Image (cartoon, rainbow, N blue to C red):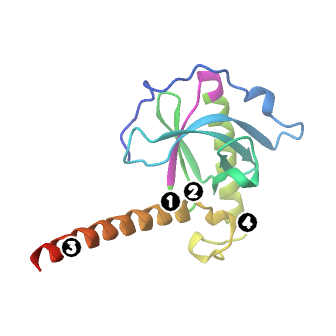
Amino acid sequence: MPLKKSLSNVDLSFTSTAASNVSADDDSFEDWMYWQRDLDNENSWTRVYGVLENEFLWLFQGEKSSKTLLIQIAVASVEESGDRQLRIVDPNGEDLEISLFDRQTFHLWKMRLHDAAVLTTAHFRAFAIEVKDLPRGSQYRGSLVTYRRVRKRAKCKAALDWMAKQWKKRVSICK
């Protein structure tokens, strides 16, 4: 379980729009929030636009548009992880942290994410399926696993490139 993190150094000086962004059919819920890109780095918070529709949460770089989609997950569970912070877990067991701007928005999102988790659980029960049996392209797999795998691969590649450069420097010195 990750340590509780604080956003005390982040400017949260604009107003929330969550209450005004609930759609008429009450299936979609959206607002600005902060997402912690790297759970191991407490300073990796990014302002994102979150959209919750039924059991799926999408995080966008800006107002919702397929061009700015960062992450898509099915919500399996949600829990409070800090002051105005929520830890959301997908069916694969991958988790992400979000932080909301005020207590009212926090409580609205917590309630709606809990409802989304109930829908996800109902889906798996209704079809008697387990996560490991999902097709690779299933929306219930989400993109968080892929996001983290790509980031990890990029970090490894950068480390290998750096080591190769260091090795070439040492070899050229020894000649």
Residue 123: x and y, percent? 71, 62
Residue 35 vertical position relative to residue 152 in the rendered view, above or below: above
Quadrant location of the C terminus? bottom left
Residue 81: x and y, percent? 46, 37
Identify the residue under disc 2. 90
Task: Identify the image quadrant of residue 108.
Answer: top right
Residues marked 1 and 3 touching at CB (< 8 Å): no
Residues marked 1 and 2 touching at CB (< 8 Å): yes
What residue appears at the point 67 percent right and 56 percent down from the top-left corner?
Answer: 120
Q: Amino acid at mark 1?
A: Gly
Going by the picture, which residue comes out furthest to the bottom? 175
* Region in magenta: 95-105
Identify the residue under disc 3. 167
**In magenta stretch: residue 96:** yes
Residue 67 vertical position relative to residue 174 in the rendered view, above or below: above
Secondary element under disc 1, as helix, strand or loop, is loop
Decide which of tag 4 and tag 3 comes sooner along the chain.
4
Secondary element under disc 4, as helix, strand or loop, is helix
- Left or right, 164 with respect to 77, comes to left
Crowding at dot 1, Cα within 10 Å, few <14 / some 14-19 / many 20+, comes out as few
